[in-house]
Image (cartoon, rainbow, N blue to C red):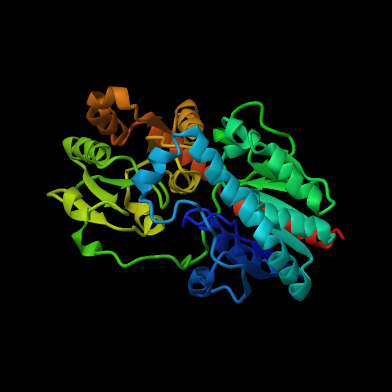
Amino acid sequence: MTTRWAIGSFGDRGRPKPLPALGQHLSAGGLDPAFAIPSDDVRPAIAAAGIDAETFPLGRPDDAGAGLTGTELAARLQRPAWQKKWLWRVLIENARLRIGPVRDAIARFAPDVVVSDAMAYDGAIAATVDGAAWASVATGLQSMADTRAYDALAQQRDALVREFGVDLAFRGSDALSPRLNLALVAPCLVPPPAPPDTVFTGSILPLRRRGDETEFPWQDLPPDRPIVIVSFGSHLSPPLAISQQVIDSAIAADAFAIVSAKDQDALQIARPGVLARRYLPQLELLPRASLLVCHGGANSVMEALAHGVPVCVLPLAYDQPLIGEMVERAGVGAMLRIDHAAGWPALIARLLRADAPERLAARAVAEQMRDGPALACRLISELATAR
């Protein structure tokens, strides 16, 4: 049996991250995966993840944000006109350019089922044109958050679909499969009412190395202090002053801060009690962490909860305000509000307590998500064999 992953056409490092992990689970379940990938850059990660898969490069995506730092991109996305142009480029124009290569990959690999990122419209269109069974996989809550930015593109999106003579259903940002829709989101974080056409599995953790791990000075971690990971993802960043306020709050709570500096100057962040690196091996660090502070990116939030680690969310864009709200509602963390920054040290100190209710709730959520990978693989396998 064969299956093919269509990795989303976004240019940031974040969106493809869960896909090699799911590929590991599919391979372990007897499926034979292939990957249609945005660029050759993903090939080493797939090989390092131990997945014996064919790869079909689609060309490097144009994300309209090339050359911008994460801080600059976050600021520009606050401007509706710029955001609309950027979303048009990454969602619609990139999909138009890739439908042909994706169809070629389907023809060459002849999969039983195509599994496509919910925001990679090229995968959904190509699979539908060629009559292939396909599943849609969402990695966040974009389709249930404020969808106005995506709705503004509906006319251009629907015109693209009509060009290929097919019908597709959409909810906000996401293309919906008529057969199977998965979301790698913990059920407790889904705002009610949960859509009945989607199965929420929670995080898909890798069975072994995911392939994107980085070197890290493990010997520098203190054995006697709680560890706070400060990571604003691979795509967006807050202003440096905000990052420093978060770090100062962790230090004030007598924690050791491990910071993903990304495109910010690590030398401006580093100080006693702080370890800053451009990128972090986050999955390896989470078992040793007491708290994750992030922007509310779904990957980071779900990975933390899968390890029973509570989360502080400082939202920057997209579905992140909704994820922060749902984190609070589920009792597994808190939102950091810019207008209440003076209270951040006390809030972080409270969440670091061993008996904090949020810590206990996060551990319970980890147990609830334990069967998520098996559920996802079973549903994909059933779709593959139903034809």
Q: Is residue 271 visible?
A: yes
Q: Is residue 370 left or right of residue 325?
A: right
Q: Position of residue 178 (x, y in %)?
A: 80, 46
Q: Is residue 146 left or right of residue 287?
A: right
Q: Is residue 131 above or below residue 149?
A: below
Q: Position of residue 261 (x, y in %)?
A: 28, 52
Q: Residue furthest right?
A: 387
User: Quarter of the image holding residue 100?
Assistant: bottom right
User: Quarter of the image holding residue 95?
Assistant: bottom right
Q: Position of residue 260 (x, y in %)?
A: 31, 52
> In terms of depth relative to the viewer, which is nearer, 88 or 239?
88
Quadrant where the N terminus is found in the figure = bottom right
Q: Is residue 162 left or right of residue 258?
A: right
Residue that appears at 24% across and 45% down: 226
Residue that appears at 13% across and 49% down: 271
Residue that appears at 54% across and 54% down: 10
Q: Is residue 310 visible?
A: no
